[in-house]
Amino acid sequence: MYIILIIFFISLVGISAMIGKKLILLKNRQIEYTEKILFEIPNLDQIKHFTAKNSKRYGYMMLVEVIRFYIKSVKFLKHIYKEIKIKVKKINNKHFPHKEKEVSKFLKMVSDYKNKIKIIKDKITEEENNY
């Protein structure tokens, strides 16, 4: 904190010394004072119109780039996730082989009924969409 304040005051003293030197030279008429404008400032309405037009354009471009980056990163992460998932399954099967167990008859019946109900629902929604 103190270092920042010391640097600030040193720069303040340096700037005031440079300005004071110029004022002394100007007072002694060693430097001529001329009103030269280095660049013209355009009309305020032009600046307002230009910034509004460019902010809309660049805002749209920035939005598109952010969405592109989001989509690419999501696809990349999904791809990496799938690869890691496959590797983990391979390692898991290698070290801990699973024995196939028979599914109980009750669970088979329940899954068959669920599949039949799903097929019936799909047919009903398809018929409703056709009308």
Image (cartoon, rainbow, N blue to C red):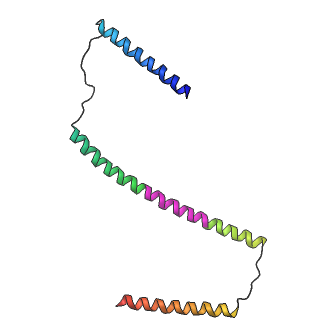
Magenta region: 66-81
Residue found at x 35% / y 50%: 58
User: Farthest residue in the top direction?
Assistant: 28
Residue 101 placement, left or right of 34: right
Q: Quadrant of the N terminus?
A: top right
Residue found at x 70% / y 91%: 104
Residue 60 lies in quadrant: bottom left
Residue 59 image point, x, y percent: 36, 51
Residue 66 image point, x, y percent: 44, 55
Residue 57 placement, left or right of 122: left
Please state the total of marks drawn on the protein image. Answer: 0
Q: Is residue 74 magenta?
A: yes
Q: Main secondary structure of the magenta part?
A: helix
Residue 14 lies in quadrant: top left
Residue 89 lies in quadrant: bottom right
Residue 43 placement, left or right of 111: left
Q: Nearer the viewer, residue 100 or 128?
A: 128
Residue 68 image point, x, y percent: 44, 58
Q: Quadrant of the C terminus?
A: bottom left
Q: Is residue 65 magenta?
A: no
Residue found at x 27% / y 29%: 39
Residue 70 image point, x, y percent: 48, 59
Q: Nearer the viewer, residue 43 or 85?
A: 43
